[in-house]
Image (tube, grey):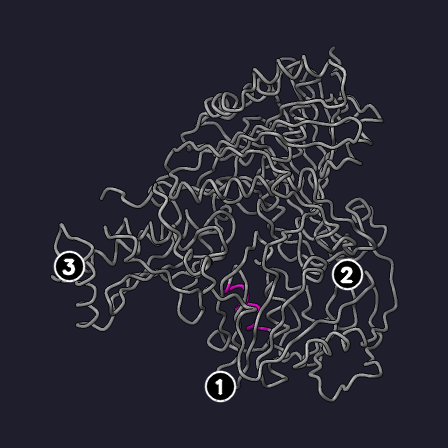
Amino acid sequence: MKNRLIGTSVPRKEAFDKVTGRARYVDDVSFPGMIYGTTVRSKVARGRLRGIALGPGIPWDEFVVVTAKDIPGINAIHLINDDQPCLADGVINHPEEPVVLLAHPDKHLLEKARQAVVLDIDELPAVHSIEDALAKTAVVWGEDNIFKRYTIEKGDIAEAFANADVILEGHYETGAQEQLYIENNGVIASYSEEAGVTIWGSLQCPYYIQKALIPLFGVGPERARVIQLETGGGFGGKEEYPSMIASHAALLAKKAGVPVKIIYDRAEDMAATTKRHPSRTVVRAAVMRDGTVVGLDIDFAIDGGAYSTLSQVVLSRGLIHAAGPYSCPNVHILGRAVATNSPPHGAFRGFGAPQSIFALERHLDEIGKYLGIAPDEIRRRNFVKPGQTLATGQVVRDDVDMNVLLDRALEAAGWGDKKARFAVENREEGSVKRGIGLATFLHGTGFTGSGEKFLASIVGVEATADGHVRVLAASTEIGQGTNTIFAQIAGDALGVDYDVIQVGQPDTAFVPNSGPTVASRTCTIVGKLVETAALGLRQTLLGSGLLEEPYSSEQFVKACSAYVARSGELRAYAEYKQPPYIKWDEDTFKGDAYGAYSWAVYVASVKVDTLTYEATVEDFVALQEVGKVIHPTLAAGQIEGGVAQGIGWALYENVVWKNGRMANDRMTDYIMPTSVDLPPIRALFAESPYSYGPSGAKGIGELPMDGPGPAIVNAILDAVGIGIPRIPATPEVVMEAYLANTSVTRVCRATEVARG
């Protein structure tokens, strides 16, 4: 059937409720007898917990007090390694470690009580940087402070370096970043002996929370129910952390015997929850005089914080993307996720790839500057082509021509005209200099390798008694448009109007586990299952004798209603089946890391004031090939929002750490770009349909975080000739580099290879 909905900008499913205020977020919800909860946290980075004292002046007999001894099951937040306790029991590993939970009907008295709790902690030496963790100035996790180590090998790296013309080495760093979603973390929990635990909350992954509650309470899945309410943004920050806050609220609810609500204020949310992993990358490139990169030796390290959480997965994504969209024949990549005594870092849009892509894309510009080759040309000489292999040995099956994408992006950005004009203007007197920079990159769709096969995601569609069709999936609407695109996909598969389709509320009691809302998998992976399940329902209805082709939406609705009246229910399910060509070795990191990639070229125009050292983005072009665009307006919004976040990470959002704690945990001193700080962002698309995506769609959500950082800093290099080795490139960072007159030989050390 011909697409009628896909490719059009239909109204958002939840738009009316959100615009009119009918949408209910967790802090809009209350239950009879509900009380409020809070968390008492450590103020030291590392130590031994000797005791807990309830201070004077508080009517403690009115309070519900929970410590580690009240946990009925295993004291751990279940995720991968289960090393993070729900509540500290003898050991403190970061400054926001939760130790005591309190609940009371009066929120104001509750805060006074929180401040009155005294934690007796013997401080121990702590680790606060990647370098100190690797140097083992103190051992704070395992035997070597390393959560996980991975290696990618391709070709013969030693031979490549021996036979190159020049070796260039650069060191690059990226900082933490706060997700800063509009709605803070919050949940409500209830508990009864009959039903077990029920959670309502602002979250991304209902089944993650269910899996955390099961061992914590020692119950089966039927006694741990999780319901997603309207959620005001996530960006990864509500992927794993809600398991913590939900566990806390549930423990209080069990002891209190009434529902408990915990809503973090902005300061607690910023200080205690996960952030983007800081990174340190060393790139050594073996290069021929013509700019061909024949060898890449990359040492990539990320700061995981005090517990492993998702760090090993973030690390793997960073490694897989570290060599970029290039055909380098010889690659060695070492990746390590290390432990420090800060709150655990976790998921954030891009998921490790922005960190490693920043290093490589910066390094390519430094290589080009050393060799006298233009930034666009150095990339053209190294682009991978269909049929060639990426760093993991994966053969590129996507129908992509990066040269064509690059040509289009440069034309849209006015690359040639700006290069010439800026070169003239920058020689004139005045403090303002301008430059233009680019980044070319790729990002995989869905979980890596056999990850999607392991998840075995399931999606259902069902006909309702009134003849509508409801999509049943655990994928959550967090502002990105999940409900809308699922309705478009199902509507086209069934050949019915958009209004016929409803999307069920994610609730572990009623929707199957379609996997987490992460990794640019919602549209491509889960959307394909929606399409398949919808086609199955359609086939059942056509075979029932109640519907014949061709049919109208009205006829379809009547047939659904009649089928349900006759048979009681009409449902169809689809389970993920991995594309047959995917072969992946998790131990060696060889093979097909992803079913498909999205490809992109981003171009930034900046101005730099050499008096104030402020860099400002004046224009931004974001071109991406994402398969089929399902909803043009939502797709453009995804890119524009992601680029805005990327600009914030590149120039403004500097997390200041003090003894492992975020010191600037207020929006008054955590600087993020506002609308007046953002340039025109032009989102452009190319389409090369992917046969395993719904109508050919590939992933889009992670992509726009990858390119802004390097494109912007490369533009600063073009403007003032100064290489910036780290982001955010705040005025202080730019001033330090400018006053030091940092040249390419300082940022990127070059060694000419001797012959004979």
Residue 458 locus on image (x, y percent): 39, 59
Q: Looking at this view, is 34 or 141 the one in front?
A: 34
When the figure is inspected, residue 707 is found, relative to residue 588, above or below; the finding is above
Residue 94, labelled with which disc? 2
The C terminus lies in quadrant: top right
Residue 87 image-quadrant placement? bottom right
Q: Earlier in the sequence, mark 2 or mark 1?
A: 2
Marks 3 and 1, how far apart in space?
42 Å
Residue 529 locus on image (x, y percent): 36, 53
Residue 150 locus on image (x, y percent): 64, 44
Dominant secondary structure of the residues highlighted in magenta in the image: helix
Residue 212: in magenta span? yes
Question: Dots 3 and 2: beta carbons under 8 Å?
Answer: no
Q: Amino acid at mark 3?
A: Gly
Check disc 3 and report the residue beneath it: 543
Q: SS for tag 1? A: loop
Q: Which residues are magenta?
A: 206-215
Residue 383 locus on image (x, y percent): 53, 24
Q: Earlier in the sequence, mark 3 or mark 2?
A: 2
Q: Would residue 126 appear left or right of 571 to someone viewing this image?
A: right
Check disc 1 and report the residue beneath it: 194
Residue 307: in magenta span? no
Marks 2 and 1, how far apart in space?
37 Å
When the figure is inspected, residue 728 is found, relative to residue 719, above or below; the finding is below
